[in-house]
Image (cartoon, rainbow, N blue to C red):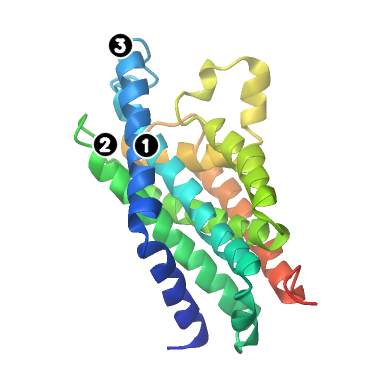
Amino acid sequence: MRGWQALFYKEILRFWKVAFQTVAAPVLTALMYLLIFGHVLEDRVQVYEGVSYTSFLIPGLVMMSVLQNAFANSSSSLIQSKMMGNLVFILLAPLSPWNWFCAYVLSSVVRGVAVGLGVLCVTMWFTPLQVVAPWWIFIFGFLGAGMLGAMGVIAGLWAEKFDQMAAFQNFVIMPMTFLSGVFYSIHSLPDFWQTASHFNPFFYMIDGFRYGFFGQSDVSPWLSLLLVGSAWFAVSAIALHLLKIGFKIRG
C-alpha cells in the first residue's frame, strides 16, 4: 500500500472493529426519530404536495446521519490519537498533508455513507420512497460527507482534550444539523429564522439531497450545489493548511 492507503485502511478498521457502536447505534437513533416524529406528525404536517410527512422525513434523517458520523469519524480519530500519544507514529511516517487529508476525509465519507445506507434500509420499510434524481442524491451525499470529514479534521487538530471536542460538536455541529430543515420546511419558520437558515450550509446539503428523492425542494438544487461546493472547498482548504503547518500536532 501507499502511505495514504495504509492510513485510510487503518481508519476504516478503526471504526469497523466497533461497528455496533459506530454504525448500528446511529441507525437505531435515526429509527427512533422516525418512529416518534413520524407517528406524532404524520397526519398533521404535509410539506410537499403528494408526499407524506414520513416520506419527507426519511431523506433528512439519512443526510443528518451521514453528516454527523462523517464528522465524528475524523474528529474522534485525531483527538484519540493525540490523547493516547500514538499520533507520533503517524507523524514519523513519510506522509504528506495531502496523504493525511485524503485518508481521514475518505474514511469519514465511508463511515458516513455506511450509516446513511443503514438508515435508508431500515426506514424505507415504513413508507414508499421514490427516487426522482439519483445523481443529486449521490452528489450531495458525497459533498456533505466530505465537508464534514474535513471539518472533523479541523476540530480534531484544534481540540486538545475531549471536553473541547464535545463543545465543538454540541455547540456547532448539532445546532447546525437540527436547524437545517431535517424535520421541517424552512417556509414554516418565522421570517428571522428563515433568513438565518439561508446562512447554514447544512440546510443546502439536506435540501439538495431531498430534491433527489422528490424533485421538490425549498431552494434550487443548483444554488444548493454552488453553495455546498464552495463551503466544501473552503473547509477543505483550511484543513489542508492546518495539516501543512502541523497545527497543534508538531512542536
Cα–Cα span, label 2 and label 3: 18 Å
User: How would you rate the neighbour count of disc 2 (Cα within 10 Å): few for under 14, some for 14-19, many for 20 or more?
Assistant: many
Residue 115 visible, this orientation: yes
Element type at mark 3:
loop
Circle 1: residue type: Ala
Please give the name of the residue rendered at 60% of the width and 42% of the height, measured from the top-left corner: 173
Provide residue 225's location: percent of width, then percent of height: 52, 48
Q: Do the residues labelled 1 and 2 touch (CB within 8 Å)?
A: yes
Residue 211 visible, this orientation: no
Give the total of numbered labels.
3
Circle 2: residue type: Thr
Q: Name the residue under label 1.
A: 30
Q: Name the residue under label 3.
A: 43
Element type at mark 2:
helix
Please give the name of the residue rendered at 70% of the width and 57% of the height, measured from the top-left corner: 159
The residue furthest right is: 251
Task: Describe residue 107's horizontal placement relative to residue 190 as left or right.
Answer: left
Provide residue 197's location: percent of width, then percent of height: 62, 30
The residue furthest top is: 44
